[in-house]
Amino acid sequence: MDAKIRVVIAKPGLDGHDRGAKVIAQALRDAGMEVIYTGIRQTPAAIVNVVIQEDAQVLGLSILSGAHNHLIPKVMELLEVNGVKDLCVVAGGVIPDEDIPRLKKVGVKEVFTPGTSIKDVINFIRNEVVHTSVA
Amino acid sequence: MSEKINKAKKRWEDETLKKTIERFPERAEKFVTGSSEPIERLYTPADLEQSDYVEEIGFPGEYPFTRGVQPTMYRGRFWTMRQYAGFGTAQESNKRYKYLLSQGQTGLSVAFDLATQIGYDSDHDMSYGEVGKVGVAIDSLADMETLFEGIPLDRVSTSMTINAPASVLLAMYIAVAEKQGVSMAKISGTIQNDILKEYIARGTYIFPPKPSMRLITDIFDFCTKHVPKWNTISISGYHIREAGSTAAQEVGFTLANGIAYVQAAVDAGLQVDEFATRLSFFFNAHNDLLEEVAKFRAARRLWAKIMKQRFSARDPRSMMLRFHTQTGGSTLTAQQPQNNIVRVAIQTLAAVLGGTQSLHTNSYDEALALPSEDSVRIALRTQQIVAHESGVAETIDPLGGSYYVEQKTNLIEQQAREYIEKIDAMGGVVPAIESGYIQKEIQKSSYQYIMEVEEKERVIVGVNNFQAEKDNKPDLLKIDFTVQEEQIARVKALRAQRDQSAVDQALQSLKTVAMGSDNIMPYIIDAVKVYATLGEICDVLRGEFGEYKEAVIL
């Protein structure tokens, strides 16, 4: 693969904790990916728009307010309504272990909780994107 | 004197140190602080040659307040133990407050949910999923009455973490007190009311800088005249640090914000000594104990100098940097969460040795969820143990005179001053935020820190070293989705029951004053008293003031 992996990092909801989102965005960029960061306080609809406009392969959702069980399914639903396919959606933030199966069930590929190594995130994304583009 | 010491130090290095280092090299090539600043092997009086004791360090309760703001510090009374709390509905939070007060807590600190903090009612589209999550949902005076039910507002001081709509929540608090028969002249507490750091780091802004600064100076003016015991602002470094800044940046950017507020009030025609005595600050306490202690001391001294020299304050109380501390949320780990109890204990020591006026200790489960009742109790007990058992509160500024701490105090003061000078050269804090300068500086520090962790140059116990196979996970507090439904039903019922024409009239008057230049506070108080909702009041102001758009910096 020669083309850069295209990633959107987004902050849904009203949560202003953007330290993690910014660090990940910068680290993915340093790892050679093309990264669009939405900024904070984005609605699910606005995020899906950015994904479509930017023709992203990966969407990273960062939530630390506890609203993940409401906001992430909403984003997934809108992606489907808009016919977005082959998008690798990952999430990060303060997300309790017990909520992870539910998020995976609606289509989230992986949930990165506090303390995850950045290298693991990069490797995961590279693997996933290679898989989807081969398939 | 320092020549003699330096000569002796050289001799020690040649005769004693060298031999040891040759046989047993040190653990690392370089040693750095929690903020990645270099640390020397040994500090001596020669490092403090420039510090005149009487001028720069001095005595507690006197300018420049390096050693503390009160003459007796904790020998007089301990700091206020104030746990930030609030979740779900007003009723649930009221129960938690009563529990905390029964456990010996001495002040309240209200956490509002994000919808409240951004001026949306619970039934607004943007509030979806956020209602009652990170704090209590307050839509109207009715919720506020429930929140403080049975809590005597003439005897408890209350801190409220509210910024963009601070005037509205203060107005509600005044109205609740009045219903309890307590006049606004008697209530005491703090509103955070610090919009600049919202643009920089925390994110709950509503309006653009100019009208936001007017709301703030209106509060200064109103409280000076009518609510004299209220701390009108809590100028906050906490969130700047949580966003990843260094200790010196925390001081520099926070005091630069402080300068902007004082200047705005002076420009609005207020006298410095009338309002500056009610300014308060809010800092973070991270794990690097000695660097943090130096940070608090440096902040105190630098602010005193700024108020005296830059703003010609005369009342020493205007020069006193009084501050609240919260232990560092971002230092807590989700892995082996019980270890956080120890981190919080170290941070508590930092805050107390740094001379804080009040303290919130984080609970050990906060990297996972909102704290449970059990974990909050341990956090409060940590403060009580430090107060009653550690001995550090028995003498004033016990680390004053440590060669390292004094040198570090000087260094942080100097670095913070350099940031302030740079910001002044950009035309002040607002242009420095709009251009993204401050956010970029924080981002650089934050990225450097995380890379040090990633490369294991910095060890975080339980995260990148000393990991456990299986974590012992505590029981977590869950906020039920029914909170949102209940809260929406409540605000809808309120709108159906209240005197709508009184609401319309109050909102119309508010609109008129928002366009003009009269003090807006009395009109907001009138509106909350007839049960206009927070969202309705903020919508009127949004209509007049517009909304702030974030400069996305990466």
Image (tube, coloured by chain):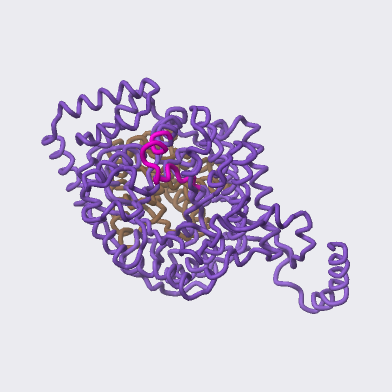
Chain colours: A brown, B purple
Q: Is residue B171 above or below residue B412?
A: above
**Splitting the image into 4 quarters, where does residue B381 fall?**
bottom left
Q: Is residue B226 magenta?
A: yes
Q: Is residue B553 magenta?
A: no
The count of marks equals: 0
Residue B380 in sight here: yes
Residue B43 drawn at (x, y percent): 74, 65
Residue B385 drawn at (x, y percent): 45, 73
Q: Nearer the viewer, residue B422 or B223?
A: B223
Q: Nearer the viewer, residue A44 or B13?
A: B13
Residue A47 in sight here: no
Q: Residue at x 57, y 69 (%)?
A: B395
Residue B427 drawn at (x, y percent): 61, 29
Q: Is residue B325 above or below residue B487?
A: below
Task: Locate the N terminus of chain B by quadrant.
Answer: bottom right
Q: Nearer the viewer, residue B380 or B240?
A: B380
Magenta part of the chain: B221-236
**Splitting the image into 4 quarters, where does residue B195 fall?**
top left
Task: Locate the C terminus of chain B by quadrant.
Answer: top right
Question: Is B404 on the left-hand or right-hand side of B487?
Answer: right
Residue most extreme to the left: B497
Question: Is B80 on the left-hand or right-hand side of B23?
Answer: left
**Splitting the image into 4 quarters, where does residue B205 fall?**
top left
Q: Residue at x 32, y 64 (%)?
A: B372
Q: Residue at x 49, y 33 (%)?
A: B551
Residue B396 drawn at (x, y percent): 58, 65
